[in-house]
Amino acid sequence: MQVSRAIRAQRERLGLSQEALAERIYVSRQTVSNWECGKTYPDIESLLLMAQHFDVTLDELVKGDEKAMDETLERDRKQMYRLGWAMTASLIIAIVGLFVALAIRDMPFIAAGFAWFAIFWGISLVFGRRIDRIEKDNDLITYGEIRAFMDGGIRKTDAAGRLIPSWERNLAKGVIGAIVGLLLALLANFLVFVVFG
């Protein structure tokens, strides 16, 4: 990425150490070092602060990285979309298999249904973990924010480029968790009163 070289060149042009730059933009020296080595990519707020301190535009600071960001966003968006569908399909297969086994009301089928559910639920978790890993490893949220900001001044987007403030995203995760918990409680209630009762 070009931004790593640009940060280093601008920092050296002003005669700043990594530590001095870190103090000015409210990050650690190690964070600046990681940016300059290309290990991580600065978030939009840090880029804006650096552009201000270096007296350059954001475009000048990330020049050359736009195409790479766009390619990474598009490639990983497609992969995350496929993984999301695979995760959803695994969950549906898990739930359907369990309810079919419970409907038969025979203990060997019920035990097999729980095993079926556990296996496909575990597979769905693997897909979900892979989605999180792609997002984190490739700085997709950071890239999405930077590209959105450069295209129109919008700052908060998710990896797919959708506007989702962090509190709404966390609320959505909480609601999904509550729904899954409710479904598991209903399943336990069904087992206790209908199958074993």
Image (cartoon, rainbow, N blue to C red):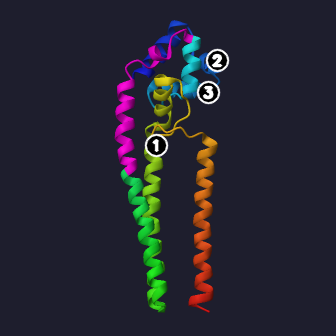
Q: Is residue 81 above or below residue 54?
A: below
Name the residue carrying label 2.
Answer: 24
Q: Is residue 60 magenta?
A: yes
User: Which circle's residue, 1 or 2, is located before the other in the chain?
Assistant: 2
**Crowd around label 1: few <14 · some 14–19 · many ≥20 (10 Å):** many
Residue at the image position 58 percent from the left and 70 percent from the top: 183
Mark seen at residue 28: 3
Residue at the image position 47 percent from the left and 33 percent from the top: 144
Secondary structure predominantly adopted by residues drawn in magenta: helix
Residue 67 left/right relative to 149: left
Q: Quadrant of residue 92?
A: bottom left
Mark seen at residue 135: 1
Image spot of residue 101 (x, y percent):
45, 84
Mark seen at residue 146: none
Q: Amino acid at mark 3?
A: Ser
Mark 3 and mark 1: span between their CA atoms?
23 Å
The residue segment tinted magenta is 54-81
